Image: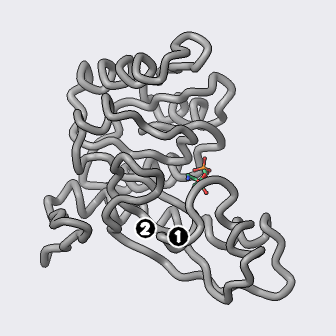
């Protein structure tokens, strides 16, 4: 798992694994920020952690290559971006084609990029939500796996809406990882087919 901050999505996966509901094992957590609270959550769960920072690897491709090396050393099958706030380079994506899942706090393809919840609010939508998708070279663009809809209230601030979306992120991310681990996801062009369980 790759993180940059708080790590609540990481925690959701850790908890699902502890309940035997993930269908896989979280073997390594990598953060680009040494102060990310998610690193502490990983350590608490006994998961090995690494920090790969921009300061140590200023060239984007070299940064991503270092992460790829760690992932390969650990023989990972799936990479989960859980609040990882960097765009991946081709070095990374070509190594893990259709094996990188991202969670985004909006109903893609609307409101890509940073502060998606605030973007939704500022746009005046009545419903927002969250999306899991396979990662391609474009930011927040790859084939969609699952989505959850969350109504917007007139009184919402970006923060309030984000807090309402977050538990839905946790659910669809856990579900998406389980579907992947159970071999039920098949990418066909822009679409993801979900095979019967
Ligand atoms: C989550 O809301 C996630 O969807 C978002 O960052 C937050 C991380 O929270 N990711 C993006 O906006 C990526 N485009 P967490 O660290 O508590 O999981």
Secondary structure of residue under mark 2:
helix
Q: How many labels does the image show?
A: 2
Question: Horizontal and vertical percent for residue 84?
Answer: 53, 41
- For the N terminus, give its image quadrant: top left
- State the residue lying farthest toward the right: 155
Residue located 54% across and 72% down the image: 110
Left or right of residue 81: residue 112: right
- Compared with 170, 38 (above or below) is above
Q: Position of residue 68 (x, y in %)?
A: 32, 25
Q: How far apart are marks 2 and 1 (CA)?
A: 8 Å
* Residue 172: assigned label: 2
* Number of residues whose C-alpha sits closer than 10 Å to that of mark 1, classed few (under 14), some (14–19) or many (20 or more): many
Residue visible at 28% across and 60% down in the picture: 178
To which residue does mark 1 refer? 130
Which is closer to the viewer, label 2 or label 1?
A: 1
- Give the percent coordinates (x, y) of residue 24: 26, 47
Instruction: Check disc 1 and report its element: helix, strand or loop.
Output: strand
First along the sequence among labels 2 and 1: 1
Please report the residue visible at 56 percent of the width from the left and 10 percent of the height from the top.
Answer: 56
Question: Residue 12's x, y, as percent?
Answer: 50, 54
């Amino acid at each position: 798992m790759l993180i940059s901050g708080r790590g609540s999505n990481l925690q959701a996966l850790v908890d699902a694994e502890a309940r035997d509901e993930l269908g896989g094992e979280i073997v390594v957590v990598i953060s680009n920020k040494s102060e990310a609270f998610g690193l502490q959550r990983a350590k608490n769960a006994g998961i090995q952690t690494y920090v790969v920072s921009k300061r140590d690897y200023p060239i984007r491709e070299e940064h991503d290559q270092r992460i790829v090396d760690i992932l390969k050393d650990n023989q990972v099958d799936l990479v989960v971006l859980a609040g990882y706030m960097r765009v991946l380079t081709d070095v990374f994506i070509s190594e893990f084609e259709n094996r990188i899942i991202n969670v985004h706090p909006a109903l893609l393809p609307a409101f890509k990029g940073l502060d998606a919840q605030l973007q939704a609010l500022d746009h005046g939508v009545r419903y927002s939500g969250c999306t899991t998708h396979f990662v391609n070279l474009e930011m927040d663009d790859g084939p969609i796996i699952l989505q959850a809809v969350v109504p917007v209230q007139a009184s919402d601030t970006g923060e309030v809406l984000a807090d309402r979306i977050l538990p839905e992120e946790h659910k669809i991310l856990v579900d998406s990882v389980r579907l992947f681990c159970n071999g039920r996801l098949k990418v066909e062009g822009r679409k993801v087919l979900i095979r019967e369980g």
